[in-house]
C-alpha cells in the first residue's frame, strides 16, 4: 500500500466519535502545539493511536474537506505581525466546512503566553458582500480595529483534515494534509505534496498520550501558519527573512 492507502487503513480501524459526542471538547480558549511531518510518518502515527484515540466521523466520512480565505490589509498587517514575532497577533479568515456547507468568519488571537482564542460568527458564504451583510465588518472591527473596507482577500487554501480525540476527551488532534494555496494578489497556485501538519489542542498542559507517540517517531514541535507559509510560497515580494529556516526545514521533511 502507498502512504495514502495506509493512512486510510489505520484511520478506518479507529473507533468513531460523532460531532454530538465531541460537543464538550470545543477548546475555544486553548494551548496549541504544532508538528510538521510527512504522510509516511502519519501512517505510522495512526497505527500507534489504535486503542487510544477516537476518529471524528461525519456522515460515514473520517476525512473532512476545508476551504479557508484569509483577509489582510494592503500592507499585509497580519502577515507582518506574525513574521515579526509580535504578540498578541491576529488573523482574519473565512472558513467553509465543505462537506456540511457551513461557513464562519473567524478571528484568531494569539497572546504572548502562547494561548489562542478564537471567536467566530456564522456567515452565508465566503463572498465579501454576504460576509458584510451578516455583520462581518462590525465583528472584525470590534476585535481587530479593521472593517471589510480595510482588508482584501489575500490567500485561500484547500486541505483535508483528520480529527482525533483521546479516550479521556481532554484534547483534540487535527491532522491536515493535501494543502494547496491560491494567492489572490499574484494569481499563483502552489501545493504542499507530502506535507502533514499536526496540531495538538488542549486546555492548559493536561497529559497528552500522543506526545509520547510523536517523540517515538521523532516528530518534533514545529510552528506552522497556513496563512504565512502559503503567503511566502505564492508571493515572492513579501518580506520573509524570518521564515527562510522554517521553509528549508519543511522542504527537508517533505522530501525525506
Image: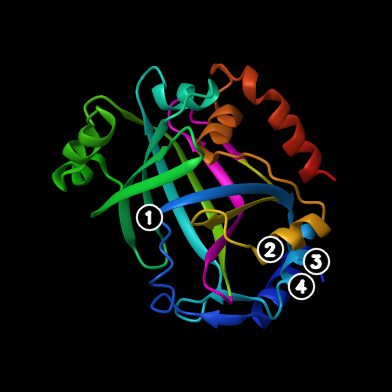
Q: Evaluate if marks 2 and 4 touch, with contact meaning CB atoms under 8 Å apart.
A: no
Q: Give the image location of residue 250, x and y in percent.
A: 73, 38
Give left or right: position of 243 versus 182.
right
Give left or right: position of 158 versus 102.
right
Q: How crowded is mark 3: few (under 14 residues within 10 Å), some or many (20 or more)?
A: few
Give left or right: position of 73 versus 199.
left
Q: Evaluate if marks 4 and 3 touch, with contact meaning CB atoms under 8 Å apart.
A: no
Residue pointed to by mark 4: 47
Residue 191 seen in render: yes
Q: Residue sitting at 16 percent across and 44 percent down?
A: 135
Taking the view exactly as shown, the residue that stands out farthest to the right is 256
Residue pointed to by mark 1: 96
Q: Describe the element under mark 2 as helix, strand or loop.
A: helix
Residue 2 image label: 3
Q: Which numbered mark, 2 or 4, is in the foreground of this view?
A: 2
Above or below residue 26? Residue 225 is above
Give left or right: position of 231 versus 34.
left
Q: Evaluate if marks 1 and 3 touch, with contact meaning CB atoms under 8 Å apart.
A: no
User: Alpha carbon of mark 1 to alpha carbon of mark 3: how far?
Assistant: 29 Å
Examine the structure image and report whether residue 60 is included in the region drawn in magenta: no
Residue pointed to by mark 2: 210
Q: Which numbered mark, 4 or 3, is in the foreground of this view?
A: 4
Q: Give the image location of residue 107, x and y in percent.
A: 34, 42
User: Alpha carbon of mark 3 to alpha carbon of mark 2: how far?
Assistant: 24 Å
Q: In which quarter of the image is residue 255?
A: top right
Q: Residue sitting at 42 percent across and 75 percent down?
A: 19
Disc on the earlier residue, 1 or 3: 3
Q: Quadrant of residue 51?
A: bottom right
Q: How crowded is mark 4: few (under 14 residues within 10 Å), some or many (20 or more)?
A: some
Amino acid at each position: 500500500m502507498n502512504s495514502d492507502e495506509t493512512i486510510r487503513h489505520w484511520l478506518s480501524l479507529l473507533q468513531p466519535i460523532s460531532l454530538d459526542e465531541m460537543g464538550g471538547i470545543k477548546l475555544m480558549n486553548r494551548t496549541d502545539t504544532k508538528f510538521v511531518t510527512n504522510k509516511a510518518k502519519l501512517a505510522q502515527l495512526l497505527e500507534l493511536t489504535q486503542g487510544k484515540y477516537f476518529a471524528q466521523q461525519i456522515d460515514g466520512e473520517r476525512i473532512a474537506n476545508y476551504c479557508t480565505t484569509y483577509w489582510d490589509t494592503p500592507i499585509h498587517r497580519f502577515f507582518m505581525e506574525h513574521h515579526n514575532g509580535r504578540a498578541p497577533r491576529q488573523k482574519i479568515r473565512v472558513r467553509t466546512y465543505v462537506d456540511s456547507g457551513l461557513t464562519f468568519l473567524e478571528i484568531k488571537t494569539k497572546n504572548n503566553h502562547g494561548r489562542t482564542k478564537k471567536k467566530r460568527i456564522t456567515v452565508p458564504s465566503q463572498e465579501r458582500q454576504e460576509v458584510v451583510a451578516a455583520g462581518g465588518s462590525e465583528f472584525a472591527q470590534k476585535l481587530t480595529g479593521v472593517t471589510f473596507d480595510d482588508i482584501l482577500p489575500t490567500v485561500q487554501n484547500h486541505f483535508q483534515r483528520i480529527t482525533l480525540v483521546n479516550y479521556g476527551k481532554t484534547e483534540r488532534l487535527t491532522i491536515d494534509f493535501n494543502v494547496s494555496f491560491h494567492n489572490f494578489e499574484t494569481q499563483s497556485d502552489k501545493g504542499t505534496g507530502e506535507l502533514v501538519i499536526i496540531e495538538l489542542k488542549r486546555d492548559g498542559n493536561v497529559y497528552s498520550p500522543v506526545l509520547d507517540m510523536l517523540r517515538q517517531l521523532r516528530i518534533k514541535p514545529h510552528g506552522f501558519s497556513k496563512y504565512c507559509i502559503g503567503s511566502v510560497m505564492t508571493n515572492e515580494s513579501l518580506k520573509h527573512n524570518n521564515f527562510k529556516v522554517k521553509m528549508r526545514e519543511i522542504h527537508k521533511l517533505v522530501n525525506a
